[in-house]
Image (spheres, grey):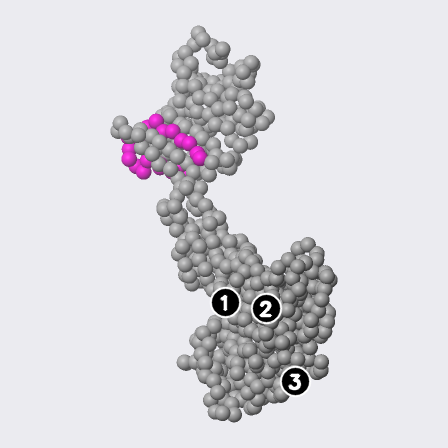
Amino acid sequence: MPQALTDPTGYSYQSRIVVDNNGVAHVVWADYYAHTVYYREFNGNMGTSPELLSGPGAPAGDPDIALDTAGNVHVVWDAAIGGPSQVYHTHRDGGKSWSTPANVSNSTFGAGTPSLASDPNNHIHLVWESGDIFYKTWDGAAWSASPDTVSQNLGASSYPAVAVNAAGAVHVSWLHNGAIFYSSTNSPPVARFTMTTTDQVVSANEDGQLNLTVSQGFNSTIPGFFSAQRSTDPDGDPLTYEWLYDGNTVGVTRDISPTLSEGIHSVTLKVTDGHGNQSTAQGVVNITARINTQVLDLAWPFISTVIDGVSWNNTAGNAEASCGKQGSDHCGDDWFAQDWNWGSYNLDWGLVLLSPATGRVIFTSTCKPNCPIRTYGQQVIIQNLDAPPYDYAVRFTHLEEVWVTDGQMICPGTPVGLIGYTGLTNQGQEKAHLHAAAYMGLFQNSAKGSTGYHWLDTNGSSLETLSLAGASRFAIRFNFNKAAHLHGCGDTFAIEGRVVSKQGGGLGGVTITVNGPQGITSSTTFGDDSGHYAVNGLARGNYTITPSKTNCTFTPLSATFSITGSHVEVPTFKANEAKCK
């Protein structure tokens, strides 16, 4: 049922209304005959009595009303008090008291038809006409000092209206020469991004730091993935992107895949909207290289061990004991199966695996980049020849790289390859580990495993299988020669080292020349910016290694070393010139 809020005997008009969170309506209007502005609140059944807001004796009208986020009421109107019409403002705080009306427009030529709007940040936005359309904001305590000219000096502009969206952008319309004009403020975009690796081992957002530890060797660079998908624009404008890595532009698309190398690097994302407004966000990438001195001296029956003061932890358990348990992932062809981890999984990726024993390589498998999933991936099996009885072999799987060949005689410390994660299902660097298993060179019977056991091919012709429910998916065929015995200990070895810039970072594009007993044994250029290099296939003897690069000299000029029966780590070469990069 309609209800009268004003005296029906008068002539009230120009009403405006807002409703607060409690459902109370706040209404202002002008009285045509009295030339005054009134306010009243109403909750549907009852309300306050009308309150006079404009002073007596001066024509007032064109009121408007808004509520700030605290629920305070703001009212504006125009009135001519002893001169040209001006825009006046009053507000009522929670204590129900009104402030003294204040002249907001202060126009020489007069001002009128004000319009109000509020935003989510407790600001009040006011526009009015005075030949052009002008704008001011209330910050909760005071109005902005000088008005902005919204109509850009078009002149003959009148009847403005203002609205604010949820993002705080201000929209204004007005009349000019019989046409409606429009303008708005534009909010800048918000730059946000995520840094991760391509296999999503670790991640960090803007204002954060992406920390990675990599092996000092062939894998000291990691493919990264940076995404600005979380960047937004409050106005819905299309965005453009610029990525800077250490101050250099490396991409202009939303997502990029940079190569992350050793050191501390700055990441900056610049996001720009269609109006030229820009926002930036920053982060840090910290790549730390770990020196590979780990030698997996695992002794039968492969109990936990400590290497370089760090415990390698068995995460799989004895396959004999675990066979028959639901979910066992190593039942079928492993004896004393172990998954070895140094610290956490991602720290194991790229570690150099050294042979733990004297022996002969009796099986290798290289399948990258197409290793079947749920397999052991790239692997090496070494028959033990340390001492009689020569009746077991060691199997290393999930390798990133394999550096030995079938039939090769190797010694303790011979580089076998790099630890990795090949053959794993939908997993990446975060699941890197060394899977080690011992194989007995005799036929074993067991009632514990539902898949049976697959032992070494003792006669070179058939793979013995005790299968109750199908062959193990990990079964592999290789020859185990019980008559084999040691004939020397390996014939080729490896060296590894590093070249750094004068500033200490890795230096790529360096040619490493190795001079040995047969003259120039190897001359190879390594492009890896980590500065790490390795040379395989070196026989015993004395060697000289020399680094070279155009416009660069190094300290030391060269290094001498001897290969006597294991691989060698060469001292680091450092560039003398700062420009050598």
Q: Distance between the residues labelled 3 and 2?
A: 23 Å
Identify the magenta region: 146-165
Identity of the residue drawn at 49% across and 86% down: 514
Q: Is mark 2 on a helix, strand or loop?
A: loop
| Res. 350 in view | no
Residue that numbered label 1 is attached to: 368
Residue that numbered label 3 is attached to: 485
Q: Earlier in the sequence, mark 3 or mark 1?
A: 1
Residue 570: name its quadrant. bottom right
| Residue 159 located within the stretch drawn in magenta | yes
Q: Which amino acid does label 1 sit on?
A: Lys
Q: How far apart are marks 2 and 1 (CA)?
A: 17 Å
Question: Percent x, y for residue 480?
Answer: 63, 77
Residue 76: name its quadrant. top left
Residue that numbered label 2 is attached to: 476
Residue 561: name its quadrant. bottom right
Q: How many marks?
A: 3
Badge 1: residue crowd in 10 Å (few <14, some 14–19, many ≥20): some
23 or 445: nearer the viewer: 445
| Res. 189 in view | yes
Q: What residue type is labelled 2?
A: Ile
Residues under numbered marks 3 and 2 in contact, where contact means CB atoms less than 8 Å apart: no
Badge 3: residue crowd in 10 Å (few <14, some 14–19, many ≥20): some
